[in-house]
Amino acid sequence: MQVLMQANGPLSAYDIARVASHAGGAIVPGQVYRTLERLIEQRRVLRIEMLNAYLTRPLSGHLCLICTICRDVSFIEAPRLQACVSEVSAAYRFTPSTGMIETLCHCRACGDAKSRVTP
């Protein structure tokens, strides 16, 4: 948990194992996955499915914006979007398994940099 709290963004299980191993004894990804599963169950950690990475759970947010260039992640409150997803899911007899919707995009910094490079 300490490794995730000190990270500047989402980390894979292998990243967590590598960083944690530098701080102490050898840690293998299997140990990390078991710990992450427990922390997810306790709602202390969130798995970003699109990145196959983990970070500390935000206090709130319905929408997870993920930059495809720098991997920055932002959580946005979007109650109308959440209500729409719930309504559509119910209409098709589905139940959302998570309250978080992930979408890939470019953050402002990467979008600005990309537009300066593109002719």
Image (tube, rainbow, N blue to C red):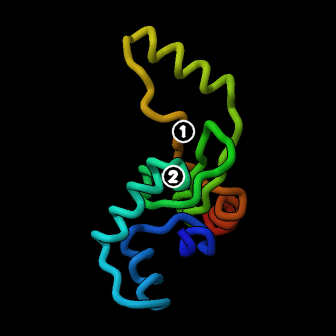
Residue at 50% from the left image edge and 49% from the top image edge: 42
Residue at 54% from the left image edge and 34% from the top image edge: 99
Residue at 32% from the left image edge and 71% from the top image edge: 31
Q: Total number of numbered labels? A: 2
Q: How far is mark 2 from mark 1, CA to CA?
A: 10 Å
Q: Where does the C terminus fall, quadrant-wise?
A: bottom right
Q: Nearer the viewer, residue 62 or 59?
A: 59
Mark 2 and 1 residues: CB-CB less than 8 Å, in contact? Answer: yes
Q: Secondary structure beneath disc 1?
A: loop
Task: Rate crowding at label 1 as few (under 14), some (14 to 19) or many (20 or more) other CA atoms within 10 Å.
Answer: some
Q: Position of residue 89 (x, y in %)?
A: 45, 17
Does residue 119 appear in this view?
A: no
For residue 22, which quarter of the picture? Answer: bottom left
Q: Which residue is mark 2?
A: 46
Name the mark nearer the viewer: 2 or 1: 2
Q: Nearer the viewer, residue 1 or 9?
A: 1
Describe residue 22's horizontal placement relative to residue 60 as left or right.
left
Q: Position of residue 117 (x, y in %)?
A: 63, 68
* Residue type (three-letter) at the residue carrying disc 1: Met
Vertical placement of 97 versus 37: above or below?
Answer: above
Q: Position of residue 2 (x, y in %)?
A: 57, 73
Q: Position of residue 85 (x, y in %)?
A: 53, 22
Q: Secondary structure beneath disc 2?
A: strand
Vertical placement of 93 versus 13: above or below?
Answer: above
Residue at 37% from the left image edge and 74% from the top image edge: 14
Which badge, 2 or 1, comes first in the chain's sequence?
A: 2
Does residue 106 appear in this view?
A: yes
Q: Which residue is mark 1?
A: 100
Tell me the tag on residue 44: none
Task: Rate crowding at label 2 as few (under 14), some (14 to 19) or many (20 or more) other CA atoms within 10 Å.
Answer: some
* Residue type (three-letter) at the residue carrying disc 2: Leu
